Image (cartoon, helix red, strand yellow):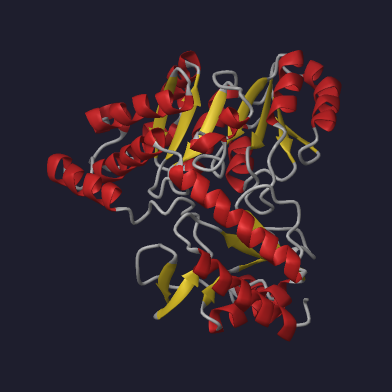
């Protein structure tokens, strides 16, 4: 009898053999500078909790009050009976924070890309996409049915070339890029990409998931480049620097109103909870009032990056608190991560297809929650394991 699952067994064996099988660890505490992972307290270099807000008392208190006021769940999609006054209050705060006309709050950053792209372009249109764009952008582009043409990573000259050569063959075009690229920590040349798109009348969209709370005093990559209100669509997430969950689509009012009418994740999936919404609103207010956490994040990131480079590690082209420690092959990165965990440091290995083959790495996520002593402990662990494995 044929084994219907033979292909699954074969693929799982291959992933194990090539060191690509993802081991999912279990978290036993709130995210912070230290966490309980698989029953052990370890130094946390893994989460996207840039500003340390995920366990902030102000966010927790806001979430608790929202549950008392609004209940545990909305029990409806936003377009039928799920839009709370609290959702609208958050959307006004997002628009004000980003310096745009309007914003829409959705379930996640991943959903935001799937919600925003298909309404803007279809089978008669073309999307110009950075080669290293996030999977959620890629999936949103595929769902649209538009022709996808890739330009070389962070290369506005190549973006102009592909636009010039291809745009005349389509009804309209959309240029889409990540703001901060999560695997390498480099920043898109947003000002130059905007110039190119404007020259040819192409719609513009940037996913600022790893830029919010980090760049532009915390307001993101658009503020970093002084382009407030100029990009047609800004995608954001509350699951990283904001420490909660949810995504947003921000930009010109006409654009956001249109997406409200067309976005399938918005129209056909239940609304975000009041607790999440209130916590997101608290995070926006904290960032609006002070840049102290942002400054602390950058101080920590610069200190750790300098220390890693002095030890001889390859930290790639990062320009942000994301610090890739590029090791090469996936089995080496997996072993490096395992030994770091034995030293009390939680930093996961990333390999293909998350990053290209031969570029496997440990990705260190710095936060404002770390102290100088925490960072020194992390550097010492990296040095010990690096010398043991012959990396440095």
Q: Is residue 70 visible?
A: yes
**Camera-side residue: 225 or 252?**
225
Vertical side of 214 occupied by 192: above or below: above
Identify the residue at horizontal 46%, vertical 75% (top origin).
Answer: 42
- Residue 175: quarter of image: top right
Identify the residue at horizontal 43%, vertical 69% (top origin).
Answer: 34
Q: Position of residue 324 (x, y in %)?
A: 68, 60
Quarter of the image for the N terminus: give it. bottom right
Instruction: State left or right for residue 90 relative to residue 156.
Output: left
Identify the residue at horizontal 84%, vertical 20% (top origin).
Answer: 164
- Residue 193: quarter of image: top right
Instruction: State left or right for residue 267 relative to residue 49.
Output: left
- Residue 385: quarter of image: bottom right
Q: Position of residue 95 (x, y in %)?
A: 42, 24
**Camera-side residue: 172 or 326?**
326
**Camera-side residue: 164 or 359?**
359
Farthest left residue in view: 68
Q: Position of residue 69 (x, y in %)?
A: 13, 40
Instruction: State left or right for residue 48 relative to residue 325.
Output: left
Identify the residue at horizontal 67%, vertical 65% (top origin).
Answer: 307
Quarter of the image for the C terminus: give it. bottom right
Vertical side of 368 occupied by 27: above or below: below
Q: Is residue 81 visible?
A: no
Vertical side of 279 occupied by 199: above or below: above
User: Count of labels shown?
Assistant: 0
Q: Position of residue 285 (x, y in %)?
A: 34, 35
């Amino acid at each position: 009898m044929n084994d219907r699952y033979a292909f699954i067994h074969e693929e799982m064996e291959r992933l194990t053999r090539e060191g690509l099988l993802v081991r999912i660890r279990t978290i036993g505490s709130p995210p912070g500078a230290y966490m309980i992972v698989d029953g052990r307290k370890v130094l946390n270099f893994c989460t996207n909790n840039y500003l340390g807000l995920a366990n902030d008392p102000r966010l927790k208190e806001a979430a608790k009050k929202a549950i008392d006021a609004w209940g545990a769940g909305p029990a409806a999609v936003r377009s039928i009976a799920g839009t709370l006054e609290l959702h609208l209050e958050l959307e006004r705060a997002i628009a004000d924070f980003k310096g745009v006309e309007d914003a829409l709050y959705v379930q996640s950053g991943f959903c935001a890309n799937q919600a925003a792209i298909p309404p803007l372009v279809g089978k008669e249109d073309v999307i110009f996409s950075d080669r290293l764009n996030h999977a959620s952008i890629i999936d949103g582009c595929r769902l649209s049915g538009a022709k996808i043409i890739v330009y070389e990573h962070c290369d506005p000259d190549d973006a102009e070339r592909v636009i010039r050569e291809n745009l005349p063959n389509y009804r309209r075009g959309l240029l889409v890029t990540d703001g901060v690229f999560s695997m390498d920590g480099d920043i898109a040349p947003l000002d130059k990409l905007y110039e190119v798109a404007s020259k040819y009348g192409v719609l513009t969209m940037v996913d600022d998931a790893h830029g919010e709370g980090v760049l532009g005093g915390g307001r993101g990559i658009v503020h970093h480049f002084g382009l407030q209100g100029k990009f047609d669509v800004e995608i954001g997430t509350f699951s990283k620097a904001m420490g909660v969950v949810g995504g947003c689509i921000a930009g010109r009012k006409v654009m956001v109103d249109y997406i409200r009418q067309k976005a399938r994740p918005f129209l056909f999936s239940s609304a975000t909870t009041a607790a999440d919404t209130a916590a997101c609103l608290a995070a926006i207010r904290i960032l609006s009032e002070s840049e102290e956490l942002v400054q602390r994040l950058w101080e920590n990131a610069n200190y750790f990056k300098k220390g890693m480079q002095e030890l001889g590690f390859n930290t790639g082209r990062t320009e942000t608190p994301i610090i890739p420690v590029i090791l090469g092959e996936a089995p080496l990165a997996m072993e490096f991560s395992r030994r770091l965990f034995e030293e009390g440091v939680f930093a996961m290995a990333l390999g293909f297809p998350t990053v290209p083959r031969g570029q496997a790495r440990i990705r260190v996520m710095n936060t404002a929650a770390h102290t100088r002593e925490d960072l020194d402990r992390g550097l010492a662990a990296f040095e010990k394991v690096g010398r043991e494995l012959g990396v440095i």
